[in-house]
Image (cartoon, grey):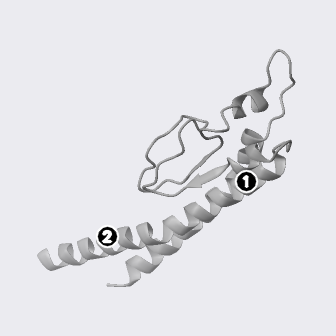
Amino acid sequence: MSSDLDRLNRRFDAVLRNVREVVQPALLKGANEIADMQRMLAPEDTGDLKDSITVTPPGGTTPPYSQPGGSRTVGENQAVVTVGNTDVRYPHFVEFGTSVTPAQPFFWPGYRLRRKRALDRIKRSIRKAVRTGWDSP
């Protein structure tokens, strides 16, 4: 009975290792696709707004004054797309508009357009990692 339990635990450990290894590239690829779409949709006056759209990998820190949420440390299984930095502090005015200027949405529409594709890629990589990890030991 103990050997069966040990074998099951080894398989679960292998699955977790495989998932962690395989998911990170899928997360980054999906985040980069979302950021690329947001750059395509962003209005371009000087190009500073487009240049401020960044992807922060797991363990990294988002730029100060970035939207949404400002500076924070990204979790182990996360990739974060932000816009804005210390020089570009106005993305929310462009996205939502002001009483003087109309809204020119680019951040959330870009996210919504590429979200499903990124999630599907992550799910595929998890399924593959589970199958590979389960069959390996």
CA separation in Å, label 1 and label 2: 32 Å
Mark 1: secondary structure: helix
Q: On the rendered image, what quadrant is the C terminus found in?
A: bottom left
Mark 2: secondary structure: helix
The residue depicted at 44 percent of the width and 71 percent of the height is 21
The amino acid marked with disc number 2 is Phe
Can you name the residue that lies furthest to the left here? Answer: 2
The residue depicted at 58 percent of the width and 62 percent of the height is 28
Structural crowding at the residue carrying mark 1, measured as other residues with C-alpha within 10 Å and reported as few (<14), some (14–19) or many (≥20): some
Q: Is residue 1 visible?
A: no
Q: On the rendered image, what quadrant is the N terminus found in?
A: bottom left
Q: Which mark is residue 103?
A: none
For disc 2, the marked residue is 12
78 on left or right of 42: left
5 on left or right of 98: left
Q: Picture quarter containing residue 134?
A: bottom left
Please name whichever residue, 76 or 91, is drawn nearer the observer in this view of the structure.
91
Looking at the image, tell me whether mark 1 or mark 2 is earlier in sequence order. 2
The residue depicted at 54 percent of the width and 44 percent of the height is 63
For disc 1, the marked residue is 114
Q: Picture quarter containing residue 94?
A: top right
Q: Residue 76, how many percent across, how many down?
A: 41, 56
Q: Residue 20, how many percent across, how many down?
A: 42, 66
